[in-house]
Image (cartoon, coloured by chain):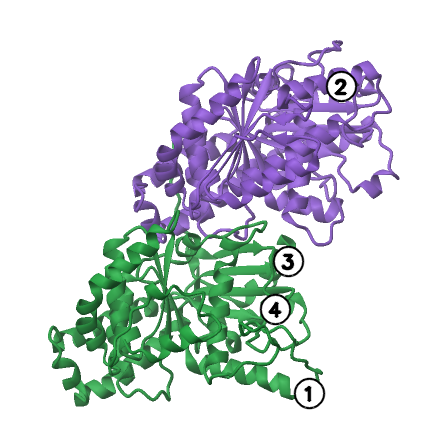
Amino acid sequence: MSIVTVQLGQCGNQIGFEVFDALFSDSHCPQKFCSKRENEAYQASCKERFFSEEENGVPVARAVLVDMEPKVINQTLSKAAHSGRWKYGQHSHFCQKQGSGNNWAYGYSVHGPRHEESIMNLIQKEVEKCDSLSGFFIVMSMAGGTGSGLGAFLTQNLQDQYSNSLKMNQIIWPYGTGEVIVQNYNSILTLSHLYRSSDALLVHENDAVHKICAKLMNIKQISFRDINQVLAHQLGSVFQPTYSGEGSFHYRRNPLGDLMEDLVPHPEFKMLGVRNIPQMSENSLAYSTFTWAGLLKHLRQMLISDAKMEEGIDWQVRPPLSGLPTLGKMPLTKEFHFNTSIANLVILRGKDVHSADLGAFKDPALYTSWLEPVTAFNVWKTQRAFSKYEKSAALVSNSQSLVKPLDMIVGKAWNMFASKAYLHQYTKFGIEEEDFLDGFALLEQVIASYRNL
Amino acid sequence: MEEGVVNEILQGPLRDVFDSKQLITDISGSGNNWAVGHKVFGSLYQEQILEKLRKSAEHCDCLQCFFIIHSMGGGTGSGLGTFLLKVLEDEFPEVYRFVTSIYPSGEDDVITSPYNSILAMKELNEHADCVLPIDNQSLFDIISKIELMMNSGKLGTVIKPKSLVTSSAGTSKKRQEKPFDKMNNIVGNLLLNLTSSARFEGSLNMDLNEISMNLVPFPQLHYLVSSLTPLYTLADVNIPPRRLDQMFSDAFSKDHQLIRADPKHSLYLACALMVRGNVQISDLRRNIERLKPSLQFVSWNQEGWKTSLCSVPPVGHTHSLLALANNTCVKPTFIELRERFMRLYKKKAHLHHYLQIEGMEEGCFTEAVSSLSALIQEYNQLDATKSLPVEDIPRLSVAV
């Protein structure tokens, strides 16, 4: 089954390009540890999901590019075309001459209705190219105007028009110390709208990815390109094919459906985060070897202590002892912010993958009391290694780790809202104070629900 | 409203850049009288101006904003210029109006400049989306600094063969320089950098409508203090490029502002940094972290930064930075302007030149002053919050 990607705004398009590039590179990476037949099955599965065939053999990404100003789309299209390896469809993009001005209200209330038909037509065309549709992957940022506002509008539309297909929104959480001054307003409005219409929100924080670039990849002058490539690597390790079940050697057909089933048991809890291990520069990779035990141990501690990368992990954090009343242990865990999960999905790729022991992830103490680990925890595997990593593990989790960043954004936005700053820019296009209040209320609810796990 | 300046442009090296049909001139000028510019020439030329504007607008696929460039102290720029603001607002309500205004400095030679400026300010308050005030004294100080650097001889400066403005014959001789050329060049560079992200590609683009969106938290507070680093003018002096971080520090020093203001010691409502050249997001973030502690931001906008990265640097440089700040440091300029106005107005000096124009009465003056006073009061209120501790406003509580 195929996934149609919708790339929105500058951020969405820049990232979307890196994602397809990463998927393609991995797909064509020379493999040492699996059979030729295995590799071909992998490649075919990847192709079915993300690329369609063109006449002259160059795969075309299953994507629709949308932006309200032309520069970024032009750049993205030409970068893909120049690579010679894959490209975007000739008519798969939509752009205008004037951007959204970082104004959520403009993206949602003006661009949305104005261009609804054209954009939905493009998406329809892309959907028709698929034999069967698994769902939509929408890449957008929260801070700007197009990705956030138009993205929220389109997701709602997709909900209405394709009610049987799944939608996963890849959201970019902006840097804490502003890229855009009204980013907190835009984020509140985006998140509250998406919570109602999307099936899952996969979140990547710029701050976290930036640290990965600095500490793990050792990049000196980090550019957005570097950040996007790390992000794409993480997404690739989640979305590339894996076996459909324990003992099976066929690749699973419905990645989005399976992701939702495994990770979103309850519609109140939709926020997902990704952790990936190992992640390092290519030079270091040549000198490193890994064991599954080592990788999984780090990954588990990253989850528990809410670390985003394998350096600087706090090993002091421990889950509360299962079975014992939490009274005695509560203060300690509260202090160290133990990260409770609703659901976890571990994805293992590489050599000897079946020998990996995942018992530690099945500890009920990791999970909220109303779910059993047998439902809350899942693992996907493939022997086929990812990119140049002999062994790699990704963890997609629905846990409390996004509560803190969400709380911060809501706090800052609320502060600004109380002074009524910038509101005239939104009311100009029909987003009133009430809409803001609705958004705040919904998100406070989400924060409270996650906190009470 | 007089022919001399426009004719000069038409004979100069840029004559082919301007469409001769899009020029309007009169003979006698406005006599440094805002009322003449606004009321007399306004009504006289309104139709003509509108027609030419419509023509230009039709050539555009998508009209985003108007740049109005004028001085506040004279008659035409100040009077007719602000008259046009209202016309643009009525005719093209969705198009942003960016105004670059040259404020009169302390020792300027037009006696009635305070009157003209205050009358113009009222219009700017009401009809402009965004104003970039600039004053001649600051420009002059910047030029002097550059010349000092040039003449100090320590840096072994060389005048580059490629000037920013070359004559149409393409020779490398410096063309005849007029006294204000260097100062105007700085303002030109300001506008150049402002629009660079809209014209060129970059990893974090910023359009002109984003400037208004991010830097204008309340409609009346739309005055932005600008600073440009590194400094360079017509002669493209080859000052060795200073370290990148120094460029950021300079942008916040009071010597680099294009108006007499000290943003570091006043309150920031918002700040935008537009970087051009080979600068990446990590450089930008590092410098923001570094400079943040020494700057005061208003309590509800502690992280009030808007940033943009454009990959193409300006000609002859590896990188440049334009900082636009919505900061209470504009207040002193306005207060001083009001004082100079009151000194004249109390004596009713030169008032008759204005009152004899049809449509002008003393009410216009008093209204203009109260409009300015209200603005100053807004800034005062903000400044008062500077020293107060940041209050945490109670959040919405929800039932779980």
Q: Earlier in the sequence, mark 3 or mark 1?
A: 1
Q: Amino acid at mark 2?
A: Thr
Which chain is purple in the rendering? A
The hue of chain B in the figure is: green
Q: Amino acid at mark 1?
A: Gly
Which residue is under mark 3?
A: B279
Which residue is under mark 4?
A: B247
Q: Quadrant of residue A51?
A: top right
Badge 1: chain ID: B
Q: Earlier in the sequence, mark 4 or mark 1?
A: 1
Q: Quadrant of residue B200?
A: bottom right
Residue B175 shown left or right of residue A333 in the figure: left
Q: Are marks 2 and 4 on the same chain?
A: no
Which residue is under mark 2?
A: A382
Image spot of residue A285 (x, y percent): 83, 38
Residue A306 shows up from this direction = no
Q: Report, in whole angstroms, how far the alpha carbon at label 3 lies from the one at label 1.
A: 30 Å
Q: Amino acid at mark 3?
A: Val
Which residue is under mark 1?
A: B153
Are the residues tagged 4 and 1 within 8 Å (C-beta)?
A: no
Q: Report, in whole angstroms, how far the alpha carbon at label 1 lies from the one at label 2.
A: 69 Å
